[in-house]
Image: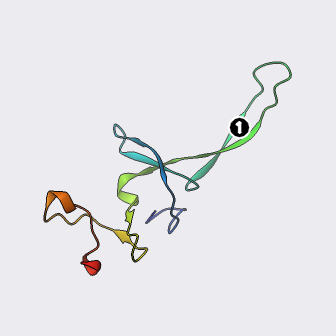
Amino acid sequence: MVISGKSKGKTGEVLRIDLSRSMVFVKDCNVQMRHTKPRRQGESGGIIPQEGAIHFSNVLQLCETCSRGVRKLCEKPAECRYNKKNQ
Protein backbone atom coordinates (compact mmCIF):
# COMPACT_ATOMS: atom_id res chain seq x y z
CA MET A 1 0.00 0.00 0.00
CA VAL A 2 1.41 3.38 -1.04
CA ILE A 3 1.08 6.03 1.70
CA SER A 4 2.31 9.17 -0.10
CA GLY A 5 2.86 10.62 -3.54
CA LYS A 6 0.68 10.64 -6.64
CA SER A 7 -0.22 6.96 -6.17
CA LYS A 8 -1.36 7.41 -2.56
CA GLY A 9 -3.85 4.78 -1.41
CA LYS A 10 -3.18 2.34 -4.26
CA THR A 11 -2.27 -1.27 -3.60
CA GLY A 12 -0.46 -3.80 -5.74
CA GLU A 13 2.11 -6.55 -5.73
CA VAL A 14 5.83 -5.80 -5.44
CA LEU A 15 7.53 -6.48 -8.77
CA ARG A 16 11.12 -5.97 -7.67
CA ILE A 17 13.22 -4.40 -4.92
CA ASP A 18 16.35 -2.29 -5.40
CA LEU A 19 18.26 -2.51 -2.10
CA SER A 20 21.13 -0.24 -3.19
CA ARG A 21 18.76 2.73 -3.75
CA SER A 22 16.14 1.68 -1.12
CA MET A 23 13.44 1.62 -3.79
CA VAL A 24 10.56 -0.72 -4.58
CA PHE A 25 8.57 -1.20 -7.80
CA VAL A 26 4.83 -1.79 -7.26
CA LYS A 27 2.51 -3.01 -10.03
CA ASP A 28 0.18 -0.28 -11.42
CA CYS A 29 1.60 2.39 -9.07
CA ASN A 30 3.72 5.39 -10.09
CA VAL A 31 3.23 4.60 -13.80
CA GLN A 32 5.59 6.53 -16.06
CA MET A 33 5.57 6.76 -19.86
CA ARG A 34 8.69 5.71 -21.74
CA HIS A 35 9.07 7.08 -25.27
CA THR A 36 10.91 4.62 -27.52
CA LYS A 37 12.25 4.98 -31.03
CA PRO A 38 12.17 2.11 -33.53
CA ARG A 39 15.57 0.37 -33.48
CA ARG A 40 15.25 -1.77 -36.60
CA GLN A 41 13.49 -1.37 -39.91
CA GLY A 42 9.89 -2.53 -39.62
CA GLU A 43 9.85 -2.17 -35.82
CA SER A 44 7.43 0.38 -34.40
CA GLY A 45 8.25 2.92 -31.73
CA GLY A 46 5.78 4.38 -29.32
CA ILE A 47 4.90 5.28 -25.77
CA ILE A 48 5.24 2.39 -23.31
CA PRO A 49 3.87 2.64 -19.74
CA GLN A 50 6.15 1.25 -17.01
CA GLU A 51 6.22 1.31 -13.22
CA GLY A 52 8.50 3.81 -11.54
CA ALA A 53 10.41 3.39 -8.29
CA ILE A 54 8.91 4.27 -4.90
CA HIS A 55 11.02 4.73 -1.77
CA PHE A 56 10.69 2.16 1.04
CA SER A 57 9.41 4.79 3.46
CA ASN A 58 6.37 5.49 1.25
CA VAL A 59 5.16 1.87 1.18
CA LEU A 60 3.49 -0.28 3.87
CA GLN A 61 2.53 -3.93 3.98
CA LEU A 62 -1.18 -4.61 3.69
CA CYS A 63 -3.00 -6.50 6.47
CA GLU A 64 -5.23 -9.21 4.96
CA THR A 65 -7.84 -9.11 7.72
CA CYS A 66 -8.57 -5.38 7.93
CA SER A 67 -7.15 -4.07 4.59
CA ARG A 68 -5.00 -1.40 6.23
CA GLY A 69 -1.31 -0.60 6.07
CA VAL A 70 0.84 -2.18 8.79
CA ARG A 71 3.87 -0.57 10.39
CA LYS A 72 6.73 -2.56 11.83
CA LEU A 73 6.12 -3.52 15.46
CA CYS A 74 8.72 -6.00 16.72
CA GLU A 75 8.15 -7.93 19.90
CA LYS A 76 9.21 -11.34 18.62
CA PRO A 77 11.43 -11.86 15.55
CA ALA A 78 9.02 -14.47 14.16
CA GLU A 79 6.07 -12.04 14.26
CA CYS A 80 7.90 -8.91 13.14
CA ARG A 81 5.06 -7.27 11.18
CA TYR A 82 1.51 -7.35 12.47
CA ASN A 83 -1.43 -5.06 13.04
CA LYS A 84 -1.79 -4.18 16.70
CA LYS A 85 -5.61 -3.93 16.45
CA ASN A 86 -5.92 -7.52 15.22
CA GLN A 87 -3.92 -9.09 18.05
Q: Residue at x 82, y 30 (%)?
A: 44
Q: Residue at x 75, y 21 (%)?
A: 39
Specify few, some or many for label 1: CA neighbours under 10 Å numbering under 14, 14-19, or 20 or more. few
Whether residue 81 is situated above or below residue 15 in the rendered picture: below
Q: How many marks?
A: 1
Whether residue 31 is situated above or below residue 60 in the rendered picture: above
Left or right of 38, for residue 8: left
Measuring from the top left, give residue 17's x and y in whole percent: 41, 43
Whether residue 43 is situated above or below residue 24 in the rendered picture: above
Q: Residue at x 43, y 48 (%)?
A: 24
The residue most toward the left is 75
Task: Name the amino acid, label 1.
Answer: His
What colour scheme was applied to this rendering of the protein? rainbow
Left or right of 39, for residue 1: left
Residue linked to disc 1: 35
Locate residue 18: give its quadrant: top left
Locate residue 76: give its quadrant: bottom left
Measuring from the top left, give residue 22's x and y in whole percent: 35, 45
Label 1 sits on a secondary structure element that is: strand
Whether residue 44 is situated above or below residue 79 in the rendered picture: above
Left or right of 41, for residue 59: left
Measuring from the top left, give residue 40's x and y in whole percent: 79, 19
- Which image quadrant: the N terminus? bottom left
